Structure formats: structure tokens, C-alpha cells
Image (tube, rainbow, N blue to C red):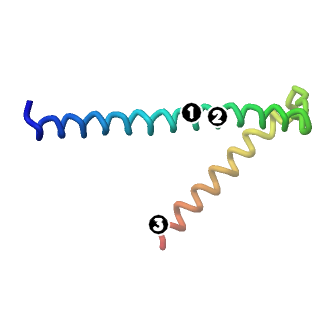
Amino acid sequence: MDKGNFMETNLVIEGFKFMGLGMGTVFLFLVVMIFSMNIMSKVLHMFFPEPEVNAAPSTTSSAAPQDNKKVIAAITAAIKHHREG
């Protein structure tokens, strides 16, 4: 085996070692980060629980078509103003 060929093989092996070390470090960091974020989420939910939302029936069913007309009028006015410059 030629010494130059051995050195190139050795460098490739060293490259793979560094690649594995780097990828392992990033993977471990991400695992630690996910666990710490889950713990922080649980702690925050203990001190600040989400408020309960009551599912009350909507009584503004007749106001919806009027709101749509207002929205359509506003969009039409904006398009007209844009085209006129």
C-alpha cells in the first residue's frame, strides 16, 4: 500500500469521525432542547392555565349578511380607489 493512498484514507476516516461527532452533538442538543421545552410548557400551564371557553350559541346570525355587504363594499371601494390612482 502506498503511503499517499494511506494518508488519503486516513483523512477520509477522520472526516467521517468529525462528521459523526458533529451530527451526534447536534442531535443530543436537539433532544435536550425538546425535553426542556416540554418541561417549560408543563410548568407554564401549571401557573397559567388556559381559560375555559364556553360554547355559547351565536345570536348574531342575522348580522352576518350585513357584515358581508359592508366587507364587499369596502373591498369594491378599495379596488376602485387603487385603479383610479
Specify whether 46 is left or right of 64: right
Q: Which residue corresponds to mark 1?
A: 28
Q: In which quarter of the image is residue 51?
A: top right
Q: Does residue 80 sit above or below 73 in this rendering?
A: below
**Nearest to the observer: residue 42 or residue 3:** 3
**Nearest to the observer: residue 19 or residue 5:** 5
Which numbered mark, 1 or 3, is in the foreground of this view?
1
Q: In x, y percent, where is residue 53?
A: 88, 30
Image quarter where the N terminus lies is: top left
Q: In x, y percent, where is residue 20?
A: 40, 33
State which tag comes first along the sequence, 1 or 3: 1
| Residue in view at x 75 percent, y 39 percent | 64
Q: Which residue corresponds to mark 2?
A: 32
Secondary structure of the residue carrying tag 3 is helix
Q: In x, y percent, where is residue 17?
A: 36, 34
**Labels 2 and 1 touching (C-beta < 8 A):** yes
Amino acid at the residue labelled 2: Val
Amino acid at the residue labelled 1: Leu
Q: Which residue corresponds to mark 3?
A: 83
State which tag comes first along the sequence, 2 or 3: 2
